[in-house]
Image (spheres, grey):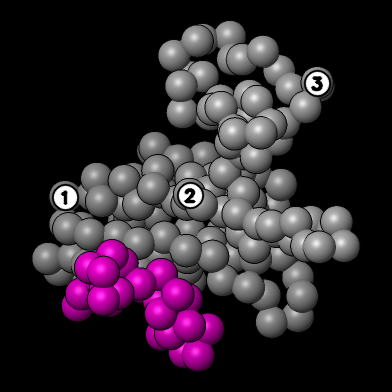
Amino acid sequence: MLTGRGLAAGYVRPSDDQCRFVEMPGHGRAYRTGDLGWVAPDGSVHVAGRIDHQVKINGYRLELTEIESAVESHPEVRQCAAFILPSADEGPVRLAASYVAHRTVPVRELREHLRRTLPSYAVPQQLHRVDELPLTTAGKVDRKLLQATAVRAPQALVAVER
């Protein structure tokens, strides 16, 4: 959260203010950034990630849910979970997606479908068909397990040609 005298009065569309600007006890009006973190006793700020499914890849901010919706809009795809893969050599992260489909969808076909709705930088670099998406004990898609599986067995992922 951000607070203080330099905080903006709000968005141009006041309807956008409701979920982002809140009252914070002891601090007044605050802006919810979407970042997850804490301030240590020594005053240093530690960022632990995001509370939503927004990621930054090659300078572009992407909502993973938008990518999932685009993949799921293919008539053969039933479910999708998008996630990022770290680079082994400290290079840029890669966008990947695992999906459940009625049949195996050729990569070229899926890629053409995604290019109609997504900008090129938002098309997952790697796609992986799975029988079912793994779930956490809370019943949510286990993105960490998908990511770990993809990192351990990258040859199982089908790279989308660029």
Q: Is 98 situated left or right of 51 in this image?
A: left
* Amino acid type shown at disc 3: Arg
Percent across and percent down for residue 155 are 47, 87
> In the drawing, what numbered circle is on residue 147?
none
> Gap in Å between the C-alphas at discs 2 and 3?
26 Å
> Gap in Å between the C-alphas at discs 1 and 2?
27 Å
* Amino acid type shown at disc 1: Pro
For marks 1 and 2 on the same chain, the one whose residue lies earlier in the sequence: 2
Asked if 63 appears above or below 129 in the picture, the reply is above
Residue tagged 3: 5
Magenta span of residues: 128-157
Local secondary structure at mark 2: loop
In the picture, the quarter occupied by the N terminus is top right
In this rendering, the count of numbered labels is 3
> Gap in Å between the C-alphas at discs 3 and 1?
50 Å
Does residue 123 appear in the picture of this structure?
no
Could you tell me which residue is drawn at 61 percent across and 59 percent down? 49
Local secondary structure at mark 3: loop
* Of 96 and 81, the residue lying toward us: 81
Percent across and percent down for residue 8 are 71, 18
Percent across and percent down for residue 82 are 41, 60
Residue tagged 2: 52
Residue 137 drawn in magenta: yes
Percent across and percent down for residue 53 are 47, 52
Name the front one of labels 3 and 1: 3
Could you tell me which residue is drawn at 29 percent across and 60 percent down? 80
Residue tagged 1: 75
Q: Are marks 2 and 3 in contact (CB under 8 Å)?
A: no
